[in-house]
Amino acid sequence: MAEIPTGKTYSGRLTRWQLGAQAERRARRYLEAAGLVFVAANMRVRGGEVDLIMREIHTWVFVEVRYRRGDAFGGAAASVTLHKQRRLLLAAAVWLARRGESLDTSACRFDILAITGCHVEWLVNAFGESGPC
């Protein structure tokens, strides 16, 4: 009889995908505890993805979740490059367009929730259409 996989790699360590999913669940709980309302997760379009879409009163909050075990290579927040920001903006624009809205007509912001080891850092309004704030 075949062995049933446990969802872990052969070494017993979680895969990168599993670590990312775990970080996104943690980020969602963190943001909900701060008063944001969950709308969607892992919204993918050709050329981009948004990890979490939340609502704060009348503002759409598009959240990039980053996880790093340690800060030896600059920490989680430092890993959100300009290229990644452009991809997030594209995905958010598509998502809003599907709802009959746009980046110009809707109140929205782009946050980064960076988890480095056990430390959580929430960068509110981390960047926008004109680039990093």
Image (spheres, helix red, strand yellow):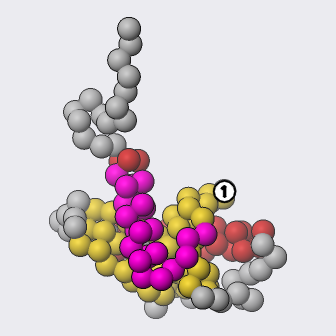
Q: On the picture, is 42 further left or further right than 112?
A: right
Q: Is residue 43 above or below residue 86?
A: above
Q: Which residues are magenta?
A: 19-39
> Residue at the spot x=62%, y=58% of the render?
44
For the residue marked with disc 1, what is the amino acid? Arg
- Quarter where residue 88 is shown: bottom right
Tell me the SS state at disc 1.
loop
Q: On the picture, is 121 further left or further right than 82?
A: left
Q: Which residue is mark 1?
A: 46
Badge 1: residue crowd in 10 Å (few <14, some 14–19, many ≥20): few
> Residue at the spot x=56%, y=59% of the render?
42
Frontmost residue, 97 versus 30: 30
Q: Is residue 87 above or below residue 45?
A: below
Q: Residue furthest top?
A: 1
- Quarter where residue 6 is shown: top left
Q: Measured from the top left, where is residue 91 in percent x and y? A: 64, 67
Q: Measured from the top left, where is residue 58 in percent x and y? A: 64, 89
- Figure quadrant of the N terminus: top left
Q: Is residue 61 above or below residue 73?
A: below
Q: Measured from the top left, where is residue 26 in percent x and y? A: 37, 64
Q: On the picture, is 3 further left or further right than 130?
A: left
- The secondary structure that most of the magenta stretch takes on is helix
Q: Is residue 57 above or below residue 47?
A: below
Q: Residue furthest right?
A: 100
- Quarter where residue 37 is shown: bottom right
Q: Measured from the top left, where is residue 107 in percent x and y? A: 65, 89
Q: How many marks?
A: 1
